[in-house]
Amino acid sequence: MTNERRLAIDQSLMSAGERVCVALSGGADSTALLLALIDANRAKESLGVVLSVVHVHHGLRGANADADEAFVRDLCARLEVPLMVERVDVAARQSHEREGLEEAARELRYGVFWRVLIECRADVLATAHTLDDQAETVMMKLIRGAWTEGIGGIAPVVEQPENRDQRSGAGTKVRIVRPMLRVRRAEVEAFLRECGQVWREDATNKDLSLTRNRVRHELMPMLRTFNPGIDATLARLSEIARDEEAFWDREMAKVLPQVVLPGRPVRGGGRAVSTVTGNSSCAIEVERLRAMPSAVCRRVVRAAARSLGCHLSSEETAKLLALAGLAEVHPPIAARTGARLELGHGLRAERTARELQLRVEAAPFVAKTTGRKAVGEPAGRG
């Protein structure tokens, strides 16, 4: 492209020589990201990456989805960028996993993304999340009562260690990056207009039955009347929260071995760890927990549950602390020996004289396609 306008993408997330695959839906954001990366490769100080594209057809929206695929095929052919088209069956996953439409589509989409990376078809996969997406995500997390890990929103980089060299056994890390998290949606559209590039509009992005769309089209415009810079403010909050989490992760790695014990106690001493698939347990020593500051106590019980594959809500965290005698909730929970709680995802808690014991008797979540939950991706298409 010959236009002088440039989109301020974060090029530091990619290195010269890497194979970068762009997740291209045909929407404005992902179309702009592809053009911006081509621009960066053609600049005097070239980014120097090898570009490709992956397009996921979700099996939804009928002829409109087919038209999206046709648009992507035409664009990639014109730009001479290699294209992979992957088809997934969202309706089938919904039926099998009993997920919402957005969650099922997101999980399948990210399953494709990780597979592209793990199968060595790319070193990096780039998605086109913007600053507006970040602000909307943080606001949704706040509404739902998220902790700081949730308020961190959309991470600029998500890494997953994978052993991709079967011969040498050498381990590598594949990653998903979001180079446009500092770019506003209005900048994206201005960039595309200056390029003379059209894009596809998804009618579902205006469907107000979807929570994110209500946040995008109703709540955020109202908040801007109080603070015109609310989007940037929320994006900064997400950066602060991610930094806080990184610090606490390091601190908790030192604390947890002192207070969280694997398995369950057995008569005669020692602890038994279940070998049955899907069964796991751990315990927290209450007296050691009691000696810790409240901020640490909360993180200990949350980390203990997470070690069993469960992510606690703020309400569940408070209930566990109440069972340990370290918080008050309504209705009250007695912190006495033998008291029990049943929480979400199959997590059960029991208070003994010395411990707060946690166990799950079935795997709380089995990611059929991704092996991990998608991280902070908004609904709709970019």
Image (cartoon, helix red, strand yellow):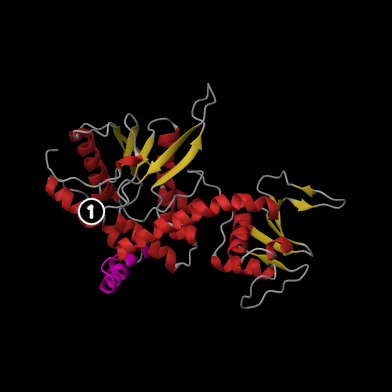
Q: Residue at x 12, y 43 (%)?
A: 4
Q: Residue at x 59, y 55 (%)?
A: 310
Q: Is residue 154 above or below residue 76?
A: below
Q: Is residue 16 above or below residue 70?
A: above
Q: Position of 198 compared to 251: left or right?
A: left
User: What's the amino acid at mark 1?
Assistant: Glu
- Outermost residue, top direction? 167
Residue 342 in percent (x, y) is at: 66, 64
Q: Is residue 298 above or below residue 108?
A: below
Q: Position of 179 compared to 376: left or right?
A: left
Which residue, given by chain and number where applicable, does mark 1 sit on? Answer: 201
Say whether residue 214 is magenta.
Answer: yes
Q: Is residue 155 above or below residue 210?
A: above
Residue 240 in percent (x, y) is at: 42, 58
Pick whichever, 15 or 219, lies toward us: 15
Q: Position of 320 compared to 101: left or right?
A: right
Residue 30 in sight in this render: yes
Mark 1 Cα shell of 10 Å, populated few (<14), some (14-19), many (≥20):
some
Q: What is the magenta segment's predominant secondary structure?
A: helix
Q: Position of 152 compared to 261: left or right?
A: left
Pick whichever, 180 or 215, lies toward us: 180
Tell me the quarter of the image containing the N terminus. Answer: top left
Magenta stretch in the rendered image: 211-229
* Disc 1, SS: loop
